[in-house]
Amino acid sequence: MLDRGRLSIAAVCVGVAERLIRDSLAYAMERKQFGRPIADFQLVQAMLADSQTEAYAARSMVLDAARRRDEGELVTLEASCCKLYASEMVGRVADRAVQIHGGAGYIADYGVERFYRDVRLFRLYEGTSQIQQLIIARQMIEKAKV
Ligand SMILES: Cc1cc2nc3c(=O)[nH]c(=O)nc-3n(C[C@H](O)[C@H](O)[C@H](O)COP(=O)(O)OP(=O)(O)OC[C@H]3O[C@@H](n4cnc5c(N)ncnc54)[C@H](O)[C@@H]3O)c2cc1C
């Protein structure tokens, strides 16, 4: 059950990250500063690219672990890897989303600040990030013994 719950939360993290990236990209293409959309600025592009890369990595991890679980494999280690990585990833993506939105990211009108607060929960419940680290390391050690 915990493996399944951790995979579900990881999948939710991917979904929230993808929504935040979509909103951030749309805002960056619309918002103009210095006479140009802020999406033209390479430092903004770097934030978008980092978020896209991390969300893609998390999506790939979740799909791989879920497929293995569907095939009957025990995925305790993989589920914890997914929960740990995806929940930390979406925190970074939400932080960048606020940054890309500038002051608008801090006020309620755009909804980004709500995601920034809400995604903090994912690193806590169904086992904190530290607990996932313990599970992963213990699984590694157990597997190395056989
Ligand atoms: C909104 C919300 C909904 C929730 N829903 C549910 C639910 O539906 N069902 C349910 O059962 N629970 C639920 N919880 C509880 C949630 O699972 C716990 O809050 C979470 O597991 C962390 O436990 P704790 O709050 O007791 O923190 P603690 O265990 O006190 O942890 C505090 C800190 O110590 C660290 N820590 C603790 N033990 C170790 C250790 N051995 N090694 C290293 N670091 C450690 C933690 O990582 C954390 O940083 C919910 C919590 C929230 C906030």
Image (cartoon, rainbow, N blue to C red):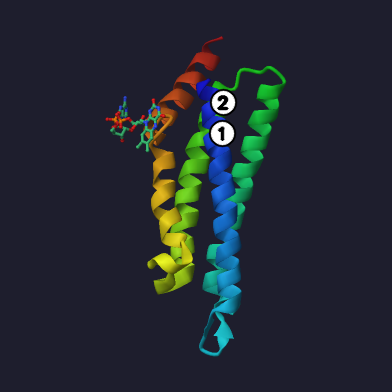
Residue pictured at 68% horizontal, 17% vertical: 72
Query: For mark 1, what is the residue?
Result: 8
Query: For residue 35, which quarter of the picture?
Result: bottom right
Horizontal and vertical percent position of residue 128: 39, 33
Instruction: State which quadrant residue 77 falls in.
Output: top right
Q: Is residue 88 above or below residue 24?
A: above
Please give the name of the residue rendered at 53% of the width and 71% of the height, measured from the top-left corner: 44
The residue most toward the right is: 71
Can residue 11 be seen here? The reply is yes
Checking the image for residue 4, the label placed there is 2
Q: Dots 1 and 2: beta carbons under 8 Å? A: yes
Q: What number of labels is visible?
A: 2
Q: Residue at x 53, y 20 (%)?
A: 1
Which circle marks residue 143 in the picture?
none
Classify the position of the C terminus by image quarter. Answer: top right
| Type of amino acid at the residue the image marks with label 2 | Arg
- Residue at x 61%, y 75% (from the top left corner): 29
Please tell me whether residue 145 is drawn above or below residue 39 in the rendered image: above
Up-down relation of residue 99 to residue 36 (above or below): above
- Give the residue type at disc 1: Ser
The picture quadrant for ligand 1 comes to top left
Q: Give coordinates of residue 97: x percent, y percent.
A: 49, 62
Q: Residues within 10 Å of mark 1 (few under 14, many from 20)?
A: some
